[in-house]
Amino acid sequence: ISEPLPVAATFDFRDEFGDSLSDVARLDTMVTVVDAANLLNDYASHDFLSDRGETMGEEDERSLVHLLTDQIEFADVVILNKVDDAGPDKVDAARKIIRSLNADAEIIETNQSHVAADKILDTGLFDFDKAHEHPMWAKELYGFADHVPETEEYGVASYVYRARAPFIPEKILAVLNGDMPGVIRAKGHFWIATRPEWVAEFSLAGSLSSIKPVGTWWASVARERWPEHVAASDYIKQHWAEPWGDRRQELVFIGAGIDWPALKARLDTCLVPAVLAVGPEALPLDLADPFPGWRHAGGVA
């Protein structure tokens, strides 16, 4: 079972002879079929694809939730199948999950996959560049201008947490690994006081979450190594604020029934107090740090 964007990328690829799949075919619509009766259980599952006998090979270690999330987030059309078997409550839960993952896709509710051909064929809906903007978390975190909140129609709400001060490692790990009622999808980046050079990424989908390093902040890179092209320079300036430079907390939480004031308060308590962190040269580096080692190309943080 393939992930959608790598499949889409094959249409743009040209081999050594200059041939491309796009010369003979056009990717028209990215369609995902969702089982309304089982989506809620599958999205809460800890199963790997290997547990379901659906791997791409022995080295395929993807989880079921990982695949479900990717296939829904990048779809142009989501066919919500078996709605009669599922019943109203499960269908409503499925709608909320789909809308929490993808704000743009057309949702077609049906039984036995009965769908009018013109809804999925020759629609012209697929756009490789815009496909990256489908995920709800991307719209909220990066503020795509055409995003229209889905709260009223589907009961889905999204909230973005932003701060500049560093997190206390033990406290933020407990919150991100703890219970967050109502949260269906969460994603973003953050930094902790004991590792001021690292950009960490948090991702939650269903019952599975992950935290991993994704690079370093420009504030921790020597100025002579900064990029010189205009777009990169503008990006750094846009996100720069003294005394922390471009270091920042940006986490989006999407779901239904989220108590945002309570969740925000929990995140606020994870920030290092200003009296203990007046700037990057005066950080409490001796705080307990339960995160695993994060590797650079040449070593461990």
Image (cartoon, rainbow, N blue to C red):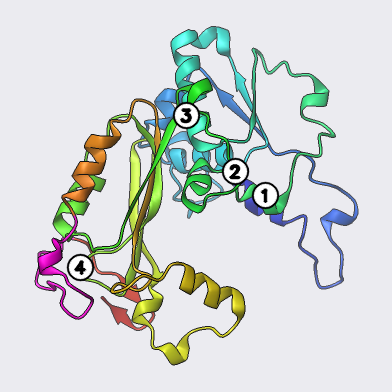
Query: Where does residue 26 sit, x and y in percent of width and height?
Result: 84, 47
Nearer the observer, 226 or 195: 226
Q: Secondary structure at mark 1?
A: helix
Q: Earlier in the sequence, mark 4 or mark 3?
A: 3
Q: Which residue is mark 3?
A: 97
Q: Is residue 177 visible?
A: no
In the rendered structure, the answer to whether residue 38 lies left or right of residue 182 reads: right
C-beta proximity under 8 Å, tags 2 and 1: yes
Q: Is residue 227 magenta?
A: no
Q: Earlier in the sequence, mark 2 or mark 4?
A: 2
Magenta highlight: main SS: loop
Please identify the quarter of the rendering in which residue 207 is found.
Answer: top left
Cα distance between the residues tagged 2 and 4: 33 Å
- Mark nearest the camera among 4 and 3 is 4
Q: Residues within 10 Å of mark 4 (few under 14, many from 20)?
A: many
- Give the quarter of the figure containing the N terminus: top right
Identify the residue at horizontal 38%, vertical 73% (top origin). Answer: 217
Looking at the picture, which amino acid does disc 4 mark?
A: Ala
Looking at the picture, which amino acid does disc 3 mark?
A: Ile
C-beta proximity under 8 Å, tags 4 and 3: no
Q: Which residue is mark 1?
A: 130
Q: Which residue is mark 2?
A: 134
78 w.r.t. 166: above or below: above
Q: Secondary structure at mark 2?
A: loop
- Give the quarter of the figure containing the C terminus: bottom left
In the rendered structure, the answer to whether residue 102 lies left or right of residue 79 reads: left
C-beta proximity under 8 Å, tags 2 and 3: no
